[in-house]
Image (cartoon, coloured by chain):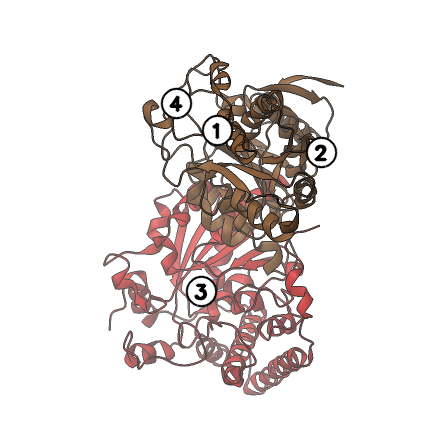
Chain colours: A red, B brown
Amino acid sequence: MKQPGAVGNILESAQNKGLKEIQPKTAIELLRCMRLIRFVEETIANRYSEQKMRCPTHLSIGQEAVAAGVCLSLNRDDQVFGTHRSHAHYIAKGGDIKAMIAEIYGRATGCSSGKGGSMHLVDLSVGFMGSTSIVGNTIPVGVGAAMANRLHKNDKICCVFFGDAVIEEGVFHESVNFAVLKKLPVLFVCENNLYSVYSPLQVRQPEGREIWKFATAYGMLSDHGDGNDALEVSEKTRAALRHIHRGDGPYFLEFATYRWREHCGPNFDNDIGYRTENEYLLWKKRDPIALLKEQLLGQGVINQADIEAMERTTQAEVAEAFDFAESSPFPNPEETFKGLYRE
Amino acid sequence: MTRTLTFAKAINEALFQAMLTDDSVICYGLGVPDPKGVFGTTLGLQERFGENRVFDMPASENAMTGVAIGASLNGIRPVMTHQRVDFFLLAMDQLVNNAAKWHYMFGGRSSVPITIRLIIGRGWGQGPTHSQNLQAWFAHIPGLKVVMPATPTDAKGLLLSSIFDDNPVIFLEHRWLYNFEGEVPENDFRIPIGEAELLKTGGDISIVSFSYMTVEALHAVEFLETNGISCELINLRSIKPIDWEMIFNSVRKTGRLLSLDTGPESGSIAGEIIARVSSNCFDALKQAPRRLTLPDIPTPTSVALTKVFYKRAEDIADVAGSMLEKDFDTNSLQAQRKFPHDVPGDWFKGPF
């Protein structure tokens, strides 16, 4: 089954990819980060039916390599803007997991004090500036934040994540035009998972469209890669960041990946007719976590005991976060009426 | 110290002083550094403060609103300008979904101190898409502040307050006010957002007004006084938040309310004022409150059609008179205007 656009080309070349030279420390960090994201999200999925997480929740299981590969390449004070599906970005940037789970549980200790939920995450202490739920809506915000960094003459980079539907939005074109015009330090990261809710790329963009090439038309450097290969994501991100740090303006990256579960919610939905079980299985075989684990085991960077230890510590971290959320108080009802304006 | 300034010059002076006071203030918009400088309001800014802080922009209203939001998250205070309110409608996603909500939806962790200057057109065939009065839209969105100055003093003092407010402010300037002159303080002074101005005290009727309608109201009030009707005139200055206390106190005194609005009737600010006064001051009311607004139709273009579209001092005097059961001839109000109905004064020769 040939997948559309750049995704298909990437998958074909992925068959023949040789093993990369691995920097052990980076690779282990990537694995740990992806494992953490997946544990968090699988726990959300497993417990969602308890009806305690009472907000729309978009899981990125299957897409962890993009978040991990990009965010772990950034500096701590670089800034990230996310989307409706941003648990992975938040966690990978180092966001406080307890505060994120508490937010999804609607608790006072949540990262947005219970005002935002799963779709509105923030942790300023690690440069996670905010995720919002409207398609394309944080792109200009990230560009503006980059403009401010330029005015402040610091060397922070703003990274904006978005999906494949975003190039269908006018605001994308407006934003990249301005970012290129002003040579702003922005990294645009497109996670192409082939679907916008249940609408496949084929009904939204012309056959043969390669999103990353769009970006080049604006006079911006652009690249694409296998979004299920964390090492490739990391390598391409670091190349992009070097370019941005030189002051040569923004950079665009498109990564091919796939969400395993339904658009919104904890379940699998390959049976409802908008995509096939076969397509899902094709991608599941390319599980980004399994791929990296195999490489690391194969090259002797880690052994089975290391992996088991990693599983235990990440599981414990996730369990602690859920305990924290569940034992946290709800906000007082009067908080509803507070915080409209900054006084 | 005060001196006489036009409304446009007062805006210009506020921008200068804000940028001098605080390096984080920047100013951009289509035409901001061009030779006309947005009706003179942005003239000289780029020369003084440089291209990093004052710049023209792509015709990308939505993204550039997002850019302002993002910059404000990193400590910048952007002032964005559009030559017409109507052009800004492309930016509703950024304004409504982001700017208005950012502080609340992230639990107060960051705020969006941006000021968006929008100009309301009128007359000279501005027509359906260059003269909309959408203040009620903006006021309807929780999280925004909406400011509508009427005088040069308002313009300066309110713009400075808006720029240094830590929240998103929609600053609506009426095109017809630009050449009006007034005494304006030289220093950096701030008029608090949410405090109305009692322009005149009186006992028979409360007239609540804002923006350009305050100018028409001043003419009407003068006429009404000479005809034995004592008016209290409130210039709201901001319509979100609104100075309810001043309105309620006035209506409790006069028992009558005439609410003026530059926009169409349904869902108007004038309607909101009548609703709240009716709920809060019902016992004090001697009769049903009235409002004077535009009709619920798009602005027509032809000079023959706009004559009956807009409301002027004589219309205000007619309604106020009828509320007090007085019938007088308002022809003198029309006669004192020596210029056509579709311009604010002799100075206006078009084109926009």
Q: Looking at the rendering, in which quadrant would you find the C terminus of chain B?
A: top left
Give whichever of A220, B337 is nearer the camera.
B337
Q: Tell me if mark 3 has few (under 14), some (14-19) or many (20+) residues whose alpha carbon lies within 10 angstroms of its own.
A: many
Q: Which residue is mark 2?
A: B190
The amino acid type found where label 3 is placed reads Glu
- Left or right, residue A290 beside residue B12: left
Q: Number of numbered discs present?
A: 4
The chain carrying label 1 is: B
Instruction: Check disc 2 and report its element: helix, strand or loop.
Output: loop
Front of the two marks 3 and 4: 4
The chain carrying label 2 is: B
Q: Which residue is mark 4?
A: B124
- Left or right, residue A118 beside residue B236: left
Q: CA distance from mark 1 to mark 2?
A: 33 Å
Q: Which mark is residue B315?
A: 1
Q: Which residue is mark 3?
A: A232
The amino acid type found where label 4 is placed reads Trp
Q: Same chain, marks 3 and 4?
A: no
- On the image, the x and y values in percent for residue B93 come to 46, 51
Front of the two marks 3 and 2: 2
